[in-house]
Image (cartoon, rainbow, N blue to C red):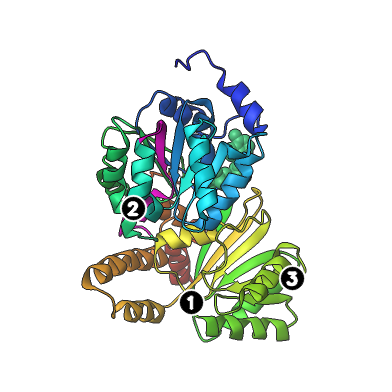
């Protein structure tokens, strides 16, 4: 089929109701429709799903979408089913299905009804599934959250390493599209190598978040008083405060509550009901602040989070970018404040000391970048974007003034101090 004459915009409108593509979507989709291997790097919320969903809907055969989380797959399948009167247009194939359901899924694929088949990597490895998928028309394989293939990413899943050899068994020249929000050069290399997509065209969006203000403060014994002051100065605004431990989450939540801040704690130690209650209270704005471990935030889409505070420094720049990225989604103000003390770095190092050596080495290297970020006197934005392989123009760049170091350069303060003395 030749898609040159097909109006991509009308398909976009027809299936998704959008009148415009976001960022690089249109170019990506054209490349996928030309049956090329494609590599997409866009920050979270950038609109990666559409990059494979739309071409899947427009092409003959079934696109296989590999995704690590069952909950994410279910959401996507429900969303796709909403665009069509045909329920079988999208399916999940996983171990939770009974025999009858599996039969229906396979029938819909064979009948050419199913355009998108979501699978977890472990289901794709199953011999019976490989055998079945060999016998049908596969339009392409999309590997979502492709950083899971890399030990340098934040969510390594060994099963992702098998994907390339499985795709090869499914047929000749099945295009692969890899997608991730992890932009570090090491992870990119691993993805390209392990998916075998050396010739893939790379589409990389900017990771700059011009509306976010980045600040690091030295962590002292007064950190809690400092946080209370900050939150009170921002009263009525939504914010997230991340702590390393569950214990600290509960302690800090109590301290804030006692001080009249409307806040709830959140961590994986609470049962599901309690977690969703606290999460809803935050989303519905019954409370202003949630104090949480990193268990909080995956898939949370509250557009007007005005600050993200890290009581404890995170274990990588990558995590810090993801966690602070939950601020200012609506384009409005977003203050990202991290408390830093070298003691916390040593704590994180200790956590890793029980792990395999290779993992420790990676963990320590990532941690040293965090130290460098916290201690730098250059623009934090420039530092962070450089870490993601992106050059930022700190004079004319978007958001150039939006960090503590640029607003109050350290050299100047020292110079002033010298004059006073
Ligand atoms: P990512 O996977 O990159 O984190 P998603 O694919 O989940 O991002 O998309 C993020 C949001 O952007 C979704 O709510 C989606 O509906 C929306 N979106 C995607 N493409 C467009 C578009 N062209 N116009 C408007 N909204 C879009
Ligand atoms: Mg996504």
Q: Earlier in the sequence, mark 1 or mark 2?
A: 2
Q: Return the x and y of residue 76 as percentages of the image width and height.
A: 57, 46
User: Of residues 20 and 37, which is closer to you in this image?
Assistant: 37
Residue 386 vertical placement versus 348 (above, below): above
User: Of residues 75 and 12, which is closer to you in this image?
Assistant: 75
Can residue 68 be found in the magenta stretch? no
Residue 157, quarter of picture: bottom left
Q: Which mark is residue 13?
A: none
Ligand 1 has an atom within 8 Å of the beta carbon of the residue at disc 1: no
The residue where tag 1 is placed is 244
User: Of residues 126 and 15, which is closer to you in this image?
Assistant: 126
Q: Secondary structure at mark 1?
A: loop
For the point 57% across and 75% down, which residue is it? 267
Q: Which residues are magenta?
A: 135-153
For the point 69% across and 64% down, which residue is it? 238
Q: Which mark is residue 160?
A: 2
């Amino acid at each position: 089929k030749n898609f040159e004459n097909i109006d991509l915009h009308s398909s976009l409108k027809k299936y998704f109701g959008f009148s415009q593509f976001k960022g690089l979507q249109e170019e990506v989709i054209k490349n996928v429709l030309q049956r090329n291997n494609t590599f997409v790097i866009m920050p979270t919320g950038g609109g990666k799903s559409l990059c494979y969903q739309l071409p899947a809907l427009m092409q003959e055969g079934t696109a296989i979408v590999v995704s690590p989380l069952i909950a994410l797959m279910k959401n996507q399948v429900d969303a796709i089913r909403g665009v069509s009167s045909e329920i079988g247009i999208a399916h999940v194939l996983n171990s939770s299905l009974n025999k009858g359901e599996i039969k229906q899924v396979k029938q819909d694929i064979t009948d050419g009804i199913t355009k998108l088949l979501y699978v977890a990597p472990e289901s794709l490895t199953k011999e019976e599934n490989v055998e079945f998928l060999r016998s049908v028309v596969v339009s392409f394989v999309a590997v979502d959250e492709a950083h899971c293939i890399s030990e340098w990413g934040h969510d390594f899943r060994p099963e992702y390493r098998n994907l390339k050899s499985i795709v090869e068994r499914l047929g000749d020249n099945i295009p692969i599209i890899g997608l991730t929000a992890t932009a570090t050069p090491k992870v990119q290399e691993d993805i390209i190598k392990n998916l075998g997509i050396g010739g893939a065209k790379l589409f990389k969006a900017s990771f700059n978040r011009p509306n976010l203000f980045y600040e690091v403060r030295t962590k002292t014994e007064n950190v809690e008083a400092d946080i209370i002051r900050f939150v009170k100065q921002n009263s009525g605004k939504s914010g997230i405060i991340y702590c390393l431990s569950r214990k600290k989450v509960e302690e800090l939540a109590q301290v804030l509550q006692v001080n009249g801040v409307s806040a709830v704690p959140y961590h994986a130690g609470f049962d599901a009901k309690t977690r969703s209650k606290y999460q809803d209270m935050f989303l519905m704005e019954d409370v202003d602040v949630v104090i949480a471990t990193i268990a909080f935030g995956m898939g949370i889409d509250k557009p007007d989070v005005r600050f993200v505070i890290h009581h404890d420094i995170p274990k990588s720049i990558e995590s810090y970018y993801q966690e602070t990225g939950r601020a200012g989604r609506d384009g409005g103000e977003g203050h990202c404040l991290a408390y830093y003390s070298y003691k916390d770095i040593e704590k994180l190092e200790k956590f890793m000391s029980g792990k395999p050596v290779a993992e420790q080495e990676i963990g320590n290297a990532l941690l040293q970048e965090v130290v460098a970020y916290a201690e730098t006197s250059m623009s934090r934005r420039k530092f962070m974007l450089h870490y993601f392989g992106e050059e930022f123009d700190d004079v004319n760049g978007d958001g150039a003034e939006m960090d503590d170091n640029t607003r109050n350069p350290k050299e100047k303060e020292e110079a002033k101090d010298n004059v006073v003395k």
